[in-house]
């Protein structure tokens, strides 16, 4: 057995190691410069760290960007309800309402207008759906109710036997 060689690993010369380190440093510098230029513009980031989409916000009243980044994309107004013409301030409401951008009144309303369409807030999805996706005055859409009922049927059949017929 040759003891001068590492098994399963590629050995690199000192020159190759230095060259690789220089390339990594250059890449890091480029990334830092890119990040620095991005941080000068207020923006909103959607998605995960990998493959994220950046939407740059343009403020026509500001002559120069401040360089500060905030989670709200530079917005100073508190969270508000997304229902058309609703001016409810969500900052005093529970975290649930702030997260889904809906006030407590509209979360329980039988129908509201969002984006010009009559909709209802689904308790299960935590989203607005068109009224046609709901049964009567229910607050959960048919799709989520079907899944809920299916889970209930599975659970009850486990307790009462499989289908109730035994031979």
Image (cartoon, rainbow, N blue to C red):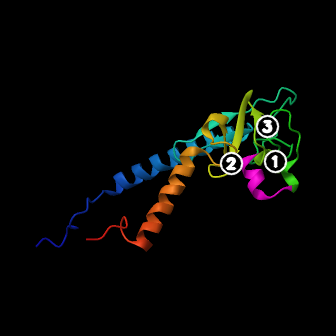
Front one among 44 and 113: 113
The percent position of residue 70, horizontal first and vertical second, equals: 76, 47
Which disc, if any, is residue 165?
none
Q: Residue at x 42, y 72 (%)?
A: 160
User: Which residue, given by chain and number where applicable, does mark 3 sit on?
Assistant: 83
Residue count near mark 1 (Cα–Cα under 10 Å), binned few <14, some 14–19, many ≥20: many
Q: Nearer the viewer, mark 1 or mark 2?
A: 2
Dot 2: what SS? loop
Q: Nearer the viewer, residue 45 or 123?
A: 123
Quadrant where the C terminus sits is: bottom left
Residue at which label 1 appears = 103
- CB under 8 Å between discs 1 and 3: yes
* Residue at horizontal 57 percent and vertical 45 percent from the top: 142
Among the 4 quarters of the image, the one containing residue 29: top right
Q: Quadrant of the N terminus?
A: bottom left
What percent of the width, then of the height, locates residue 23? 45, 46
Query: Sequence-wise, which precedes: disc 3 or disc 2?
Result: 3
Mark 1 vs mark 2, CA separation in Å: 15 Å
**Which secondary structure type mostly characterizes the magenta part of the structure?**
helix
**SS at circle 1:** loop
What numbered label is drawn on residue 139? 2
Q: Is residue 4 above or below residue 94?
A: below
Q: Quadrant of residue 158?
A: bottom left
How packed mark 2 is, by other alpha carbons closer than 10 Å (few <14, some 14-19, many 20 or more), is: some
Nearer to me, 95 or 138 = 138
Left or right: where 63 falls relative to 56: right
Q: Nearer the viewer, mark 3 or mark 2?
A: 2
Can you see residue 109? yes
Where is residue 65 drawn, in percent x and y? 80, 35
**Horizontal placement of 19 versus 33: left or right?**
left
Q: Are marks 3 and 2 in contact (CB under 8 Å)?
A: no
Residue span colored magenta: 93-102
């Amino acid at each position: 057995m040759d003891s001068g060689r590492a098994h399963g690993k590629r050995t690199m010369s000192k020159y190759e190691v230095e060259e690789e380190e220089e390339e990594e440093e250059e890449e890091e510098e480029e990334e830092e410069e890119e990040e620095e230029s991005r941080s000068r513009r207020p923006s909103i980031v959607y998605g995960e760290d990998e493959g994220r989409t950046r939407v740059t916000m343009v403020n026509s009243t500001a002559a120069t960007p401040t360089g500060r980044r905030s989670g709200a994309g530079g917005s100073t107004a508190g969270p508000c309800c997304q229902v058309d013409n609703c001016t409810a301030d969500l900052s005093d409401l529970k975290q649930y309402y702030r997260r889904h951008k809906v006030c407590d009144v509209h979360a329980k309303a039988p129908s509201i207008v969002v984006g010009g369409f009559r909709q209802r807030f689904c308790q299960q999805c935590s989203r607005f759906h068109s009224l046609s996706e709901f049964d009567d005055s229910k607050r959960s859409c048919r799709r989520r109710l079907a899944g809920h009922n299916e889970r209930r049927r599975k659970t009850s059949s486990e307790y009462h036997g499989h289908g109730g017929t035994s031979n």
